[in-house]
Image: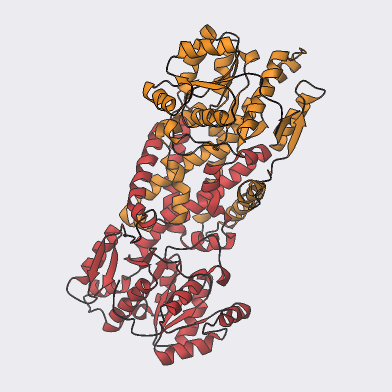
Chain colours: A orange, B red
């Protein structure tokens, strides 16, 4: 954890599971934070719990501009564009971040408005099948990976330009915010993030939906016999279809790549199972090795019984803007490592 | 639960997770039970815990014959044939059941030796990624579906022959054994069972292995970002590859049917995702409906907080050999229902 403080207030736009949980954790850490919710009733519920929230977007953005806040966009992808339009109008100098689960389409909206120099993307790998303010709670982000994008810095570097100090300061503050809510800041560029989550977050949804349908096609006997393996394999099929469409539909190119890999593996398995000597040993061994490797990596994070949880992600301490810091970010990205600011 | 007692001792051949847990539960219920384990060290471990077990197969089968025991074959599929050969030699009149997870290949071995009239198949839908005596424990079968096959009775009926009383008596005793260990006896013929488990047990393994490999292919960044959906979706990839081959390899025809359904769904999803307007809403809604339906069915079994757990499976009470009992079994099969004996 960094001991340095975030240099400005935080303004949350959207108080669903992620935005609401950020509001709770930042409040609990006594950091100045205020927010906006699209639904009046949602905003009222949060206000009744004592939070500083409103359902007036122009007002909240005007206040963010006056206080020099960081604006955290925590709305569904299909609302990002209209929020950014309002930001351009009412908060023309604020730093921006977001929590949307696919980063390319957000970055396109950012670029379309020339906001790259004020934007650092984010994506907390935390969440459940639940959504909305009612599902938000303190501690959601504890030890979760929280991806921070840094494409603008590499774009400046590649163009032979210095990275503006304002962007560096924003990047540092977003990392501090991530650490303040107990998450681990993992730097990754937009394309690398989207390719990774297609494999480990969006493909699981597609496979779970498929398994649920094929199981259900088996009729009541199959449903009656369904036990642990089916329950685990279909759990995320409980996610709201609109949310699945938000994630998978907006990350389609990367998801198609992952899905094609899966189809190649499944088609090969099908051929071996349909042969005279049905055999799935090769896939079973490859899957077991992969699972063992990943479980070993994530084990320390999730299964340690020690009261002091030790992250399994390597940590790189860096000074944003200092010598070689971009190289350090790229190194952390390639290692799935976390960063801390000094 | 039936109040009637099983009319004979039980002899377990194989003391792995399933056989060992049956031995523990039947012992705890004070029913006469003894067993055999192929590995001397496994047999010794069980014996040291006070169980009546041996590593001498001819001796245990001879004893089963002398005591008129039901023999429960709880060995991997590839050992079933040799155990049946020993049964023919040392226990030529005992009733037989088994716990193998695919029923067609067992029934082929049974038919090959003309043992149909002495055999009632079984398959408890209980188990974990763990295996062996060390994983066995009391209560493994509580409220689990435990499939009981009855093909021989329908074969007799279809041939216009009466079902022999010895077979009916064996069937009733196997159902009583299932109830005694707290499981729910779900009647299903061999082919229907294998088709159902291909969908809800074996396909989940194939999809989990595939997901684990595609995730692992994403490298360290993807592994670092993997969270709940990936962990759930790959859990059964932790199963020993040899066990996966045992299940999937021996149920290949039914699994290929299920896998082809999955491939059709996934290929259609891929096309929609690769289109100009990427869309996965149709699959997401179908998967969500299927998951909701199945969760509603299984909810009462697994998530009730009531101290008296109520099964979500309809119960049919029947008198084996009585009027219309075969029709009742077929009805229970079509409903995924459980049966009790009166």
The residue located at (37%, 55%) in the rendering is: B305
Height in image: A132 above or below B338? above
Does residue B104 appear to the left or right of A87 in the view shown? Answer: left
- Provide residue B267's location: percent of width, then percent of height: 46, 38
Q: Nearer the viewer, residue B306 or B105?
A: B306
Does residue B182 appear to the left or right of A5 in the view shown? Answer: left
Q: Nearer the viewer, residue A21 or B99?
A: A21
The residue located at (42%, 23%) in the rendering is: A43
Report whether residue B113 is seen: yes
The residue located at (30%, 83%) in the rendering is: B166
The residue located at (28%, 67%) in the rendering is: B339
Height in image: B72 above or below B293? below
- Quadrant showing the N terminus of chain A: top right
- Provide residue B252's location: percent of width, then percent of height: 47, 58
Q: Nearer the viewer, residue A281 or A251?
A: A251
- Residue at the limit of the structure toward the left, as seen here: B323
- Provide residue B133's location: percent of width, then percent of height: 56, 72
Report whether residue A189 is seen: no
Does residue B95 appear to the left or right of B57 in the view shown? Answer: left
- Residue at the limit of the structure toward the right, as seen here: A323
- Quadrant showing the C terminus of chain A: top right
């Amino acid at each position: 954890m960094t001991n340095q403080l975030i240099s400005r207030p935080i303004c949350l736009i959207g108080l669903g599971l992620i935005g609401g949980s950020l509001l709770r954790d930042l409040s609990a850490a006594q950091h100045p934070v205020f927010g906006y919710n699209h639904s009046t009733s949602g905003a009222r519920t949060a206000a009744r719990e004592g939070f500083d929230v409103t359902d007036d977007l122009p007002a909240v953005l005007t206040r963010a501009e006056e206080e020099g806040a960081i604006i955290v966009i925590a709305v569904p992808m299909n609302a990002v564009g209209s929020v950014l339009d309002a930001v351009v109008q009412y908060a023309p100098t604020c730093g921006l971040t977001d929590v949307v689960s696919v980063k390319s389409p957000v970055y396109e909206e950012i670029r379309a408005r020339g906001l790259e120099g004020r934007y650092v993307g984010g994506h907390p790998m935390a969440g459940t099948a639940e959504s909305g303010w009612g599902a938000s709670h303190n501690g959601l982000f504890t030890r979760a990976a929280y991806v921070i994008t840094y494409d603008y810095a590499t774009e400046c570097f590649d163009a032979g330009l210095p990275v503006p100090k304002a962007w560096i300061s924003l990047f540092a503050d977003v990392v501090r915010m991530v650490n303040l809510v107990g998450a681990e800041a993992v730097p990754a560029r937009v394309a690398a993030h989207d390719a990774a989550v297609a494999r480990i977050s969006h493909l699981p949804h597609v496979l779970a939906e498929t398994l649920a349908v094929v199981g259900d096609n088996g009729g009541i006997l199959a449903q009656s016999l369904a036990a642990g393996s089916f329950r685990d394999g279909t759990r995320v099929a409980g996610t709201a279809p609109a949310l699945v469409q938000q994630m998978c539909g907006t990350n389609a190119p990367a998801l198609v790549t992952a899905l094609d890999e899966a189809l190649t593996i499944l088609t090969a398995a099908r051929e071996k199972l349909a042969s005279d000597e049905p055999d799935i040993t090769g896939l079973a061994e490859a899957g077991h090795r992969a699972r063992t490797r990943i479980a070993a990596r994530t084990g320390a994070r999730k299964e340690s019984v020690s009261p002091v949880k030790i992250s399994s992600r390597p940590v790189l301490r860096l000074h944003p803007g200092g010598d070689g810091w971009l190289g350090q970010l790229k190194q952390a990205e390639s290692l799935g490592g976390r960063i801390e600011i000094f």
